[in-house]
Amino acid sequence: MAHKPADRIRNVALIGHRGSGKTSLTEALLFEAGVINRLGRVDEGTTVADFEPDEQEREMSIGASVVSFEYGDRKINLIDTPGDPSFVADTLGGLRVVDAAVVVINAVMGVEVHTERLWNRADTEGLARLVFVNMLDRERADFFRALDSLKEAFGAHVVATEIPIGSEHEVRGVIGLIDMKAFEYGGAERGNVAEAEIPEDLRAQAEEYREKLMDEVAENSDELMERYLDGEEISHEEIVTALKKGVTEGHLFPVTCGVATKNLGTNRLLEALVEDVPSPAMRGAIKALDADGDEIEIEPDGDGEPVAYVFKTTADPYTGRINLLRVYSGVLRSDSQAFNVTRRAKERIGQLASPCGKETSTVDELGAGDIGAVAKLRETRAGDVLAAKDAGISFAPLDLPAPVMAFAFQPKSKGDEDKAAAAVRRLTEEDPTLDVHRDPQTGEQIIAGLTQIHVEVVVDRMKRRYGAEIELKPPQVPYLETIRKSAKAHGRYKKQTGGRGQFGDCHIEIEPAEVGIGFEFVNAIKGGVIPSGFIPAVEKGIAEAMERGVLAGYPMKDVRVRLYDGQHHSVDSSEMAFKIAGSMAFKQAAADAEPYLLEPIVKMTIGVPEDTVGDVVGDLNSRRGRPLGMEPKGSVTEIQAEVPMAEVLDYAPDLRAITGGRGDYTMEFQRYEEVPAHIAQKVIAEAQAKDEEQVKA
């Protein structure tokens, strides 16, 4: 099958807050285009885009789903993106490869916080935007209130091209403001629309909003503006051309409306995707980086060298790794060779495919501007660039949020460690916001995601796809111990067993060292009272003793140890004896040196709506936090604070509750500080109780 030229392709992402109806809108567009014969429903798990079992169970999109279809002589690559911030990586990856976004708004809720973030990201990517106000049939749905919230959030250039006929459960159609025609819908079947007269009670309102539309459209052309101000008639074609120019250049954001689940207004949105959204050819060159990191431009040239960007990787236990990609230049062909510029590896391109949810149709080639899929590439992952040769081309990495919700995990069954490790590795390949590592201090395996639901979905997928079950628990806080003053101790290990015995004797002095040193060992032995061959054993014994402190069993740090005296036996002394003697001496000295507990302090950057700043700061104070400052950043206020890590292990759900789901945060380790005495007593008591339980077990 020959590929479509770039001017006949439309690449569009549906974005918006969770619950705005993006998946239902995708379904309606597929139905209206004749791709499917009946409208699936999210609550029944029968939609094309939400095909993963966990999406159907949770009734929400978890991954970005590509549905490619032809409508007339156009090919439309539609990406249905997740609206929950937990799965924003797929959304941001989808925005990277499209030329336009349809921002879907719930007519009851208006603009919600995640919609604002995605709008700003679409702006950063230079995308054209349309708006679809959905769910007009819901109780308390109000198109005009939603339009006002859009203008308030995104500026005056958000302008209605349609207004609804009727409201809430009585909504029955829309009025197109360009041609001043009414369209009434009956039932959800295809072709359910009939042109009608504008109702008299809505004519004045329609004329008011058409005038607002014409004001915005005329601004995109000096000639049109002059004729418009002179009262001349402007043709349909001139309006559409000026509208498309404004949309493409990001100066104008048309607002349409309807009810996706009733297929009301979706035919007009489909036409808008064809008429008003720029093609890859119209959008023009895409910015990239060369081998030196300098900015270059890639033209959507079908005759150029092939360059493709992989924006999503799926790990499938049966078909293997599947990569979704966009071709920016040239033609990518099935059964050809490519070079992974990012990983500097050759790849064999097998059978290319055009996806429509979980179904795919094979294609011989993908041309410039097109989106498709390829399976079983050995090295390639999301974010990689494929080219015909080592072209030295890259794209700026996606700015992804850092994982903040961490859990310790272990396999449910002994012997499943390898299975769990393989499953985790596969899932981290497809989700770059997932972090899996072993804590070097506690030894725990840690899995961290953006939210609790994010981690829970990963755990469900491990079980469903790979049969690997793991248990989650809160991670241990990596406390440390140190000392407040110097102390001396004598360690002697003597053991006689009838034959050759064991003998090691050493005197040490310990003192606090500079912060960050960790452990410093000073050999001050004189006169050979301890032979030089045994001194490393003393040091090793002390280092091992420091791994488990004398207060609560946490590692010790920032201690200087001086070995200044000792004894040895010409026959019975051994490395093992001096190692044990060093360990004994250190434990005694540490207990006499006023040991105390240290806790990790993290720096948090928290973005919240202005009206919740006081509540968030109050909550941070209750967590022993120290606010460092606040700064307005667009529609949110950014709070910076230092907080003990132990106080924010479960911060994500609490912040969501305080801000109504509108807040987010990042955190990074700063330093260690002394634990307040009353909290230290509790931590020490818990550690001792745990040790007693282990002894009993």
Image (cartoon, rainbow, N blue to C red):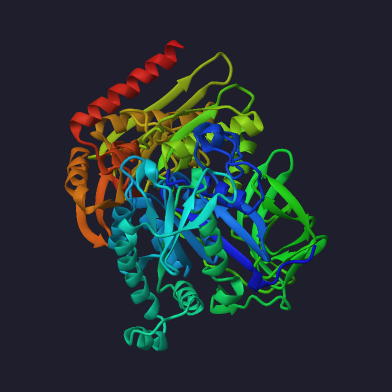
Above or below residue 311? Residue 241 is below
- Compared to residue 207, the image places residue 382 above or below, namely above
Left-right relation of 92 to 225: right
| x then y, percent, for residue 629 | 20, 57
Q: Nearer the viewer, residue 85 or 106?
A: 106
Residue 349 x %, y %: 77, 59
Q: Nearer the viewer, residue 529 or 616?
A: 616
Q: Residue at x 73, y 38 (%)?
A: 318
Residue 163 in the figure: left or right of residue 353: left
Seen as rendered, the residue at the extreme top is 696
* Residue 639 falls in image quadrant: bottom left
x and y percentages locating residue 388 in the rendered image: 74, 70
Up the image or down, 501 lies above or below 259; here it is above
Which residue is situated farthest in the right direction here?
335
Q: Is residue 525 visible?
A: no
| Quadrant of image for the N terminus | bottom right
Question: Between residues 40 and 249, which one lies in front from this camera angle?
Answer: 40
Q: Is residue 277 visible?
A: yes
Residue 340 point in image, percent of width and height: 69, 63
Task: Give the residue displayed 35% in from the left and 47% down from the top.
Answer: 167
Taking 521 as reference, is 297 left or right? Answer: right
- Is 67 in front, or is 391? 67
Q: Quadrant of residue 684?
A: top left
